[in-house]
Amino acid sequence: MLSGKFAITIHILTLLNKFPNDYLSSEYIAGSMNLNPVLVRKEIANLKAHHIVESKEGKNGGTKLSVDAAKLTLKEIFEMTFETIGLGYAKNQPNPDCPVGKKINQNLDALYKEMNQKVNAQLEKISLEDFSNQF
Amino acid sequence: MLSGKFAITIHILTLLNKFPNDYLSSEYIAGSMNLNPVLVRKEIANLKAHHIVESKEGKNGGTKLSVDAAKLTLKEIFEMTFETIGLGYAKNQPNPDCPVGKKINQNLDALYKEMNQKVNAQLEKISLEDFSNQF
DNA sequence: TACATTTGTAACATATTTTATTACAGTATG
DNA sequence: CATACTGTAATAAAATATGTTACAAATGTA
């Protein structure tokens, strides 16, 4: 299973982009995605750490975008969600006495790295604005 | 989290390719990857369903490759493990009354589909033999 | 000032998925 | 016929993801 972090984050950002002048509450955002507001706030905390959004506490508080949606790429969003493309690793450490076991993870790493480069090149071409305009 | 199916499967196939004339037991294979033999047999069952390997039951039984490693691509292996590239979806059904909620999954689908195409194009260029030769 | 509303965050609970184990019937080998 | 395998089901354990509750702190507003 892949966690839904990226999907949640881009959903949040799309909403914020649709209402660039408002501070949206986590409750409102959560309503659009049918998710617990606390989880929304957690993802927002991550976005704040990356200076992508700003929040206002207290009554009428909420969150708004603080960057230009035309300049924020999906690649950056992808990386902010700590995710990388890959096809996984076996859970346990392989047998170092086996020539295959000894090098399997290294070789998978190399493969996944290449995959990431391809995907990143693609995601870099799409801005939040582009994505948001599809709605 | 992504399951380790692909990693396990390619590990198995690499081993089988290294010993093309032997029937390797699930116990032996499991030893190389420090995994439970039953899990190995499960992945082998999947490979068998795709006619990639053949097994022999009984004493001195085991599994061996039944296709040309030069012609089996990582793309095919990837697809046999039921995995697709993607960055996930939020778990819950989004709010259909929200313009973003209503279309988010559809738009993510389109994005992930493109990503899969890129990745598949890359994986298609690599054969099991190529991968195996790195060891 | 007092109240209502909202963020921020921690602690805990539940659900889901993945991995591991046990068990045993069936099959081939020698 | 004993041994060493596969095949598969049932169950258990571990890991991860998601959800909930609770409450302090901040801020607007009556």
Image (spheres, coloured by chain):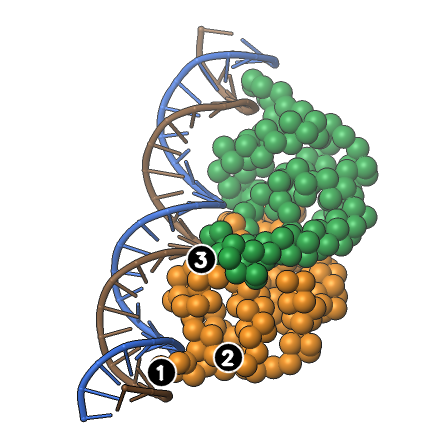
Chain colours: A orange, B green, C blue, D brown
> Marks 3 and 2: which is nearer the front?
2
Are the two marked residues, 1 and 3, in contact with CB atoms closer than 8 angstroms?
no
**Residue A79 makes an appearance in the image:** no
Instruction: Please give the name of the residue rendered at 62% of the width and 40% of the height, measured from the top-left corner.
Output: B82
Name the residue rendered at 76%, 30% in the picture. B67
- Give the distance between the C-alpha atoms of the residues marked 2 and 1, in whole angstroms: 15 Å
The percent coordinates of residue B54 (x first, y second) are: 67, 25
Q: Position of residue A67 (x, y in %)?
A: 61, 82
User: Label for residue A22?
Assistant: 2
Q: Earlier in the sequence, mark 2 or mark 1?
A: 2
Measure the alpha-carbon separation of dots 1 and 3.
23 Å
**Frontmost residue, A52 versus A85:** A52
Counting from the top left corner in percent of width and height, residue B120 is at 75, 49
Determine which quarter of the picture holds residue A66: bottom right
Look at the picture and state if A104 lies above or below C10.
above
Q: Which residue is mark 1?
A: A58
Closest to the observer: B22 or A67?
A67
Decide: is B106 above or below A29. above
The dot on residue A34 is: 3
Badge nearest the viewer, 2 or 1: 2
The image shows a total of numbered marks equal to: 3
SS under mark 2: loop
Name which residue lies at 60% across and 56% down.
B103
Q: Position of residue B1 (x, y in %)?
A: 51, 53
Provide the secondary structure element on which disc 1 rests.
loop
Of the numbered discs 1 and 3, the one sitting upstream in the chain is 3
Residue neighbourhood size for the residue with mark 3, other residues' Cα within 10 Å, grouped as few (<14), some (14–19), many (≥20):
some
SS for dot 3: loop
Q: Which chain contains the residue that carries disc 1?
A: A
